[in-house]
Every structure is written in structure tokens, then in C-alpha cells.
């Protein structure tokens, strides 16, 4: 088991295909966020396929677990993060006028998958994490977790307390009356 995503292609001089198992800490890939923590090392199964002209096609199965906070009830929960990569590494330097492509370039000695794996895992971090699709969240008056039971707060029939405190609720009063006839000049 390796602890890096940097591979020495000299190990593949006499082989066309090789599989590596890696276990890399999230800190090594700069995967530190305020609202999401990688709680398990990043596990990767990396397949290196030698192509013509010393190019390599690399596939990788990547997985980890992320600890996030529910946006409704504020409970912390775990989310599985899993993704697959397929990248062609070409021998040489990247052309200066190259447009965005799926090709990466390497120096002839080492292939470094760190940045590609980091980017793929960043995409897996949920933007709006919910512990459950039907999470009830917190009471807007007392803060009780409504998933654990109801609270004794009274809601008025006019506007809920949260809507009454919402500074944008006055915008509804500014909308033109839809029943009125259009203004004809």
C-alpha cells in the first residue's frame, strides 16, 4: 500500500500495465475546509496503462468519507465520497497555446495524480448537505430540533415568525395587484 499519488514510471519500463493501491491523508491533498472534513484517508486504486510514445492512460477509483453539518438541523453526519478518473498523460511539456483538454503532461520520470484527485474530491463535497431529504430542521422560535419531536411554540396564522422577521417579506407588498387592469396610456 502506497501513501502517495506520485508514481515513478521507471517502475514500468518492462510492463504495459500496473495497478497500485494507495491510502493518502486528506491533508496531503490540501483537502481542508471549514464546513467539511475528510474523516478517512483517500483510498485510490490506480491503473497505469502504457500507451505508444511513452504516454500513459491512468484510471483511478477514489473514495473517502466527509463529515458535514446538515443545513436544516445542524447535526453532523457522514457522507461517502466516491469518484472515478480517466486521464491521458503525455510525455513532454504542455504547449503554451493549448486549449483546455483532457490531456496532462509529465516529465518522463514521474506521474503526479495529486491535483486531479484533489479536484475530483472537491466536486464531491456537498454544497447544501441534508442529513435526510425530509429533515424538519429547527424551530424558528425556540431552536428545538423538529426531527426529535414537536415544540410548544405557537405559530400565528398570518405569517410564521421566521417570515415576519424576514427583511424581504415587505417585497410581496410592493408587487402590483394582479387583479387590477393593466395601465393603458
Image: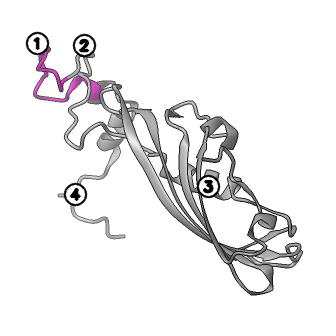
Mark closer to the chain start, 2 or 1: 2
CB under 8 Å between discs 2 and 1: yes
Taking 91 as reference, is 149 left or right?
A: left
- Disc 3 marks which residue? 117
- Disc 4 marks which residue? 178
Task: Relative to 153, say whether 51 is above or below.
Answer: below
Name the foreground residue: 173 vs 84: 84
Q: Which of the 4 image quarters holds residue 98? A: bottom right
Q: Residues within 10 Å of mark 2 (few under 14, many from 20)?
A: few
Q: What residue is at 44 percent from the left and 33 percent from the top?
A: 67
| Helix, strand or loop status at disc 3 | helix
Q: What residue is at 30 percent from the left and 43 percent from the top?
A: 172
- Disc 2 marks which residue? 142
Taking 10 as reference, is 117 left or right?
A: left
| Helix, strand or loop status at disc 1 | loop
Q: Residue 81: where, in percent of width, then height?
A: 45, 48
Mark closer to the chain start, 4 or 3: 3
Magenta includes 143? no
Magenta includes 155? yes
Q: Which of label 1 and label 4 is nearer to you?
A: 1
- Disc 1 marks which residue? 152
Q: Quadrant of the C terminus?
A: bottom left
Q: Residue 164: where, in percent of width, then height?
A: 28, 26
Q: How is the image coloured?
A: one colour
| Helix, strand or loop status at disc 4 | loop
Inter-mark Cα distance, 2 to 1: 9 Å
In this rendering, does residue 58 appear at all? yes
Q: What residue is at 18 percent from the left and 24 percent from the top?
A: 146
Q: Residues within 10 Å of mark 3 (few under 14, many from 20)?
A: many
Q: Which of the 4 image quarters holds residue 25? A: top right
Q: Which residues are magenta?
A: 146-162
Amino acid at each position: 500500500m502506497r501513501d502517495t499519488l506520485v508514481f515513478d514510471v521507471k517502475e514500468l519500463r518492462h510492463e504495459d500495465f500496473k495497478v497500485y493501491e494507495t491510502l493518502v491523508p486528506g491533508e496531503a491533498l490540501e483537502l481542508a475546509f471549514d464546513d467539511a472534513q475528510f474523516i478517512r484517508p483517500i483510498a485510490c486504486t490506480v491503473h497505469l496503462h502504457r500507451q505508444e510514445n511513452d504516454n500513459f492512460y491512468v484510471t483511478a477509483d477514489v473514495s473517502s468519507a466527509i463529515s458535514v453539518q446538515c443545513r436544516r438541523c445542524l447535526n453532523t453526519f457522514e457522507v461517502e465520497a466516491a469518484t472515478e478518473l480517466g486521464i491521458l498523460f503525455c510525455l513532454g511539456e504542455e504547449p503554451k497555446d493549448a486549449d483546455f483538454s483532457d490531456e496532462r503532461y509529465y516529465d518522463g520520470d514521474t506521474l503526479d495524480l495529486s491535483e486531479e484527485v484533489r479536484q475530483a474530491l472537491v466536486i464531491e463535497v456537498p454544497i447544501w448537505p441534508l442529513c435526510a431529504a425530509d429533515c424538519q430542521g429547527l424551530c424558528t422560535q425556540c431552536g428545538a430540533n423538529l426531527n426529535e419531536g414537536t415544540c410548544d411554540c405557537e405559530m400565528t396564522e398570518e405569517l410564521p415568525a421566521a417570515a415576519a422577521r424576514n427583511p424581504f417579506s415587505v417585497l410581496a407588498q410592493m408587487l402590483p395587484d394582479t387583479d387590477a387592469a393593466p395601465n393603458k396610456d
